[in-house]
Image (tube, helix red, strand yellow):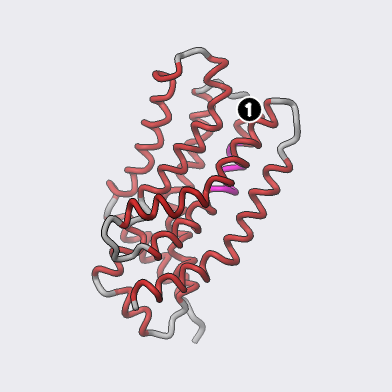
Amino acid sequence: MPDSSFALILRRDLRLAARRRIEVFLPLVFFLVASSLFPFGVGPEPRTLREIAPGIVWVCALLSAMLSLTSLYSGDHADGTLEQLLLSRRSLTLLAAGKALAHWLLTGLPLLLLAPLLGLLFGMPPASIGVLTLGLLLGTPVLSLLGGIGAALTLGLRNGGVLVLLLVLPLCIPVLIFGAGAVTAVEAGLSAQGHLSLLAALLLLCLLGAPLATAAALKISVD
């Protein structure tokens, strides 16, 4: 019988999230609130807001994705589910991939859908909003994949949430730079293809390596 770890863990996480809607909406609320606070700090001048909008959206998206990382594996570890999966013959790599996809569907995809609205609020032109959305489509899965590694490495540790931030945030800086840089290039009349290509390369690299690294980290943390 083929290994169905990926589909099983994906369905399970989505069902659990449907029962804990407050935890699911918390990153989205943070994303909207944090983004809307910047005009109060830098002033309402439209040109200034339009220039800093890509960085604001990307920083808030990054921090929002980090909010739910600590609970990515902690619940399964606390109730013994993770130990049972380790004892079974199911693939931990597929488990990690399913967890990352569930995290992106619950966190990254809603942020992706809200980003054009924030772009309009900051006065960004349609071309810039399109590039911003495309960059988030390529970059937010990277945040979920890298976040899974950090969550697995800090599993069961005291102050694990702080450690996850310290581990994952430096790794996500290239995503932030290329994502915001793509929009900046378009607004300067240049092509964003280079930045988007680098984001796509990072996504491909993480798709190939992050689930394997997460599976190894889970074995280390549980053992």
Q: Total label count?
A: 1
| Residue 47 part of the magenta segment | no
| Residue 138 part of the magenta segment | yes
Residue ID for mark 1: 126
Is 124 in front, or is 146? Answer: 146
Quadrant where the C terminus lies? Answer: bottom left
Residue most toward the left?
79
Q: Is residue 79 above or below residue 138?
A: below
* Mark 1 surroundings: few (<14), some (14-19) or many (≥20) residues within 10 A: few
Residue at 36% in and 43% down: 27
To which quarter of the image does residue 81 belong? bottom left
Is 82 in front, or is 13? Answer: 82
Q: Is residue 133 above or below residue 207?
A: above
Q: Is residue 129 above or below residue 205?
A: above
Residue 177 appears left or right of 37? right
Element carrying mark 1:
helix
Which percent across, then down, holds residue 74? Answer: 30, 63
Residue most toward the top?
45
To which quarter of the image does residue 134 belong? top right
Residue 147 appears left or right of 54? left
Residue type at mark 1 is Pro
Residue 190 appears left or right of 23? right
Q: For the stretch drawn in magenta, what is the main secondary structure?
A: helix
Which percent across, then down, holds residue 156? Answer: 29, 66
Which percent across, then down, holds residue 205? Answer: 62, 61
Give the residues drawn in magenta, as a range. Answer: 132-139
Residue at 33% in and 65% down: 155
Residue at 74% in and 26% down: 189
